[in-house]
Amino acid sequence: MTPLSPPEAAAHRAALLDWYSRHARDLPWRRDPRPWHVWVSEIMCQQTRVSSAIPYFERFIARFPTPAALAAVDIEAVYPYWAGLGYYARARNLHAAARQVAQTHDGEIPSDPEVFGALKGVGRYTRGAVMSIAFGHREPVVDGNVVRVLCRLLAVEADPRSAPVQRGLWASAAALVDGERPGDLNQAVMELGATVCTPKSPTCLLCPLQGACVARATGQPERLPVKPARKAAAQVALVAGLARDDAGALWLARNPDQGLLGGQWRLPGLPADDPQALTALGLTPTAATPLITVHHAFSHQRWTVAVYPARGTPRGGDFVEFRAVPEAALDGLPLGGPALKALRALGLKIKARRGAGR
DNA sequence: AACACGGGGGG
DNA sequence: CCCCCAGTGTT
């Protein structure tokens, strides 16, 4: 693709900044855009709608107001503030990065793009976002919104994931941001993609770039960007045991940090069709039919979990810890989606996604 | 280049 | 039910 030329970019920049100054949303991290706030917001917003991230951001910043505050705690203390947001590696990487900042940068978030970009969990997008928004550097960003806006503006018919289109998109974003108010410019393009140049029904009449947009001229802007076919999610059947200790507390298991639902708690279980498979975890099912069966869809797997009543003390499997948890203490625990769904369906009262110990 | 990695909101 | 979201790290 042919990237935006500097003169084109300058004209678009002016229109975008004017539009943004009138239509920017009031978001919590914009009220006090110190680097830590911007950084946390960018991590939370990865593959996550802004509206979903907002309550998590508020709780997280209240508990961890600085990188040092985050660096000072164990990762287990961080999970409750991330439980329900998904992509838990983000929390682990942010925690690790906060420790890098605390130890090797004296608690100061690096303002050098090269240095900041080397931190855990900081990729090309996050580097550009934090450097431009928090420090005013002319660093580009390309996220899903920018891809959509630029592919329509420039009528890009090729797969946006392909290397040549990626190069063109980043070059165009770099041309756009190479001027005044780089942070506002980057946010303007993203904001436009999120609120006007939307995937299904863009409201082109409200768009500051409508006169220049090639896809709009064709009459079918929603046709772009082209989306590659998606692979079907794998079906996975699991059995899980609902077992209690002598005091009536519920046995839970904690996932290893790596992998799906890393660090999160769940009912002890494993992939299987037969409840007898639970004996591998030290549990004996006490009924032939499940108490309940829950369905849970991830982007790449579809789980069907049959929950059986069981006795015994769980051990082994792929878990890093087992704990008998009184029902009243379930609120404070980072529970994975399937476990939360199952326990609620069984009548246990567990508060909505937390902010534990606030 | 392809895949793993969550969960929810909206068509 | 499917799509998509202020992406990154691994293979």
Image (tube, coloured by chain):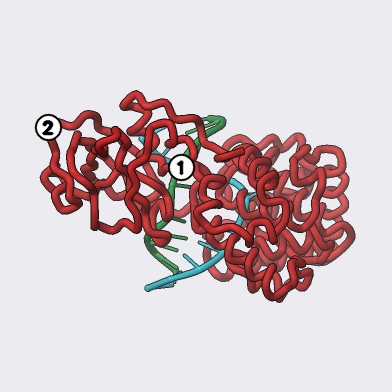
Chain colours: A red, B green, C cyan
Residue that numbered label 1 is attached to:
A333
- Quadrant where the C terminus of chain A sits is top right
Identify the residue position indicated by label 2 in the image: A287
Q: Is the residue marked by circle 2 packed among few (<14), some (14-19), or many (20+) residues within 10 Å?
A: few
Q: Chain of mark 2?
A: A
Estimate the x, y position of residue A202 in percent, counting from the top left: 65, 37
Marks 2/1: CA–CA distance: 28 Å
Q: Earlier in the sequence, mark 2 or mark 1?
A: 2
**A52 or A232, nearer to the observer:** A52
Q: Residue at horizontal 29%, vertical 34%?
A: A247
Secondary element at image label 1: loop
Vertical arrangement, residue A199 with respect to residue A348, above or below: below
Q: In the displayed structure, does residue A216 sit left or right of residue A25?
A: left
Q: Residue A171: which quarter of the image?
A: bottom right
Is A317 above or below relative to C3? Answer: below
Q: Is residue B1 left or right of residue A186?
A: left
Q: Residue A1 occupies which quadrant of the picture?
A: bottom right
- The residue shown at (80%, 62%) is A177
Where residue A356 appears, as percent x and y from the top left, is 55, 40
Closer to the camera, A287 or A293?
A287
Residue neighbourhood size for the residue with mark 1, other residues' Cα within 10 Å, grouped as few (<14), some (14–19), many (≥20): many
**Residue at 21% across / 43% down in the picture?**
A239
Give the amino acid type for the residue marked by disc 1 in the picture. Answer: Leu
Q: Is residue A170 left or right of residue A267?
A: right
Regarding mark 2 in the picture, which secondary structure is present there? loop
